[in-house]
């Protein structure tokens, strides 16, 4: 199936995550489809990823960027456009479930908003002139925490709730330009960061199994490659009439009746 992503310039935040992370897996899948990834991330892993790709003859760009600093975001987009002259897709993927709770100081709450939501606004704002030209699209990566809450993570929950609302707001704003805006919502996915968290728990293995048992489809966590596959389909021309949607890739975790689990 041709997703028609070949030579499309795709800007992705958080694309320099650890190997096997959602961002890095999306990056790998973009390359497989022949897209040109432009990674906007503060982690210098991105430089190594791009060198590795360029050594294989793949066109890619890394712009080291602290996504909590507005000026750096603006500069990053200028660098992308200076090199490619266009932007076809924006994937707002960066995010950290940072545990900024009600007990945290205001500064920590604001810092959480800056990374997990305001960066989405600023990336979209600065990419927008180029997305209008290309009639491109925007995909926000969201979290079930914006729907369900989690406890102890007010900053992240507020941010992800905001991203859900902004997805619909931008879909309305940008429909006149033919720009689609959607949000992919993830629940339990076994990424390297998730694994690191499990390792910090005294009863980590037991906790992990308990979480898996609560996922209706297959009693397993969502694999990063499944999220990447849905990402690529959603940004592709094959999803040409899909906009303003919250798309769940979660094995039924958020919406399906827990009574289903008794049958397993």
Image: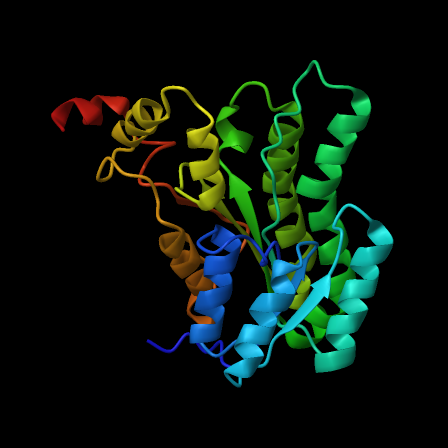
Can you name the residue that lies furthest to the top here?
Answer: 103
Can residue 179 be seen from the camera position used here?
A: no
In this rendered view, identify the residue nearer to me: 105 or 158: 105
Where's the C terminus, which quadrant? Answer: top left
Q: How many marks?
A: 0
Rendered position, 258 above or below 191: above
Where's the N terminus, which quadrant? Answer: bottom left
Q: Horizontal and vertical percent for residue 204?
A: 37, 25
Which residue lies at the image location 33% right of the left edge and 29% below the top edge? 208
Rendered position, 168 above or below 146: below
**Where, by quadrant of the figure, is residue 239 drawn?**
bottom left
Image check: 26 left or right of 97? Answer: left
Can you name the residue that lies furthest to the bottom here?
Answer: 57
Can you name the residue that lies furthest to the left here?
Answer: 263
In this rendered view, identify the residue nearer to me: 27 or 137: 27
Can residue 186 be seen from the camera position used here?
A: yes
Rendered position, 3 above or below 255: below
Which residue lies at the image location 54% right of the left edge and 48% below the top edge? 141
Which residue lies at the image location 45% right of the left edge and 59% below the top edge? 25
Image check: 131 left or right of 137? Answer: right
In this rendered view, identify the residue nearer to me: 264 or 166: 264
Rendered position, 76 above or below 2: above
Q: Horizontal and vertical percent for residue 140?
A: 58, 51
In this rendered view, identify the residue nearer to me: 191 or 37: 191
Image check: 6 left or right of 98? Answer: left
| Model colouring | rainbow
Which residue lies at the image location 49% right of the left edge and 81% below the top edge? 6
Q: Horizontal and vertical percent for residue 8?
A: 57, 77
């Amino acid at each position: 199936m041709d997703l028609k992503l070949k030579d499309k310039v795709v800007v992705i935040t958080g694309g320099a995550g650890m190997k096997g992370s959602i961002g890095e897996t999306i990056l790998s899948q973009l390359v497989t489809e022949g897209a040109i990834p432009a990674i906007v991330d503060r982690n210098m892993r991105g430089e190594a990823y791009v060198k590795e790709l360029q050594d294989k003859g793949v066109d890619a760009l890394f712009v080291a960027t602290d996504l909590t600093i507005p000026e750096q975001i603006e500069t990053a987009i200028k660098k992308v456009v200076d090199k490619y002259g266009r932007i076809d897709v924006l994937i707002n993927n960066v995010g950290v479930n940072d545990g900024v709770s009600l007990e945290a100081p205001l500064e920590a709450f604001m810092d959480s908003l800056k990374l997990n939501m305001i960066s989405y606004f600023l990336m979209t704002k600065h990419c927008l002139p180029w997305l209008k030209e290309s009639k491109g699209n925007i995909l926000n990566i969201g979290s079930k925490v914006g729907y369900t809450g989690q406890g102890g993570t007010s900053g992240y929950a507020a941010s992800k709730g905001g991203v859900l609302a902004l997805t619909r707001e931008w879909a309305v704003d940008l429909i006149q330009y033919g720009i689609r805006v959607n949000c992919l919502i993830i629940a339990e996915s076994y990424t390297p960061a998730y694994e690191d968290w499990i390792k910090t728990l005294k009863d980590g293995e037991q906790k992990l199994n308990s979480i898996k048992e609560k996922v209706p489809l297959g009693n397993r966590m969502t694999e990063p490659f499944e999220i990447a596959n849905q990402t690529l389909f959603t940004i592709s021309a094959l999803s040409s009439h899909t906009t303003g949607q919250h798309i769940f890739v979660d094995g039924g975790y958020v919406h399906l009746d827990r009574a289903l689990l008794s049958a397993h």
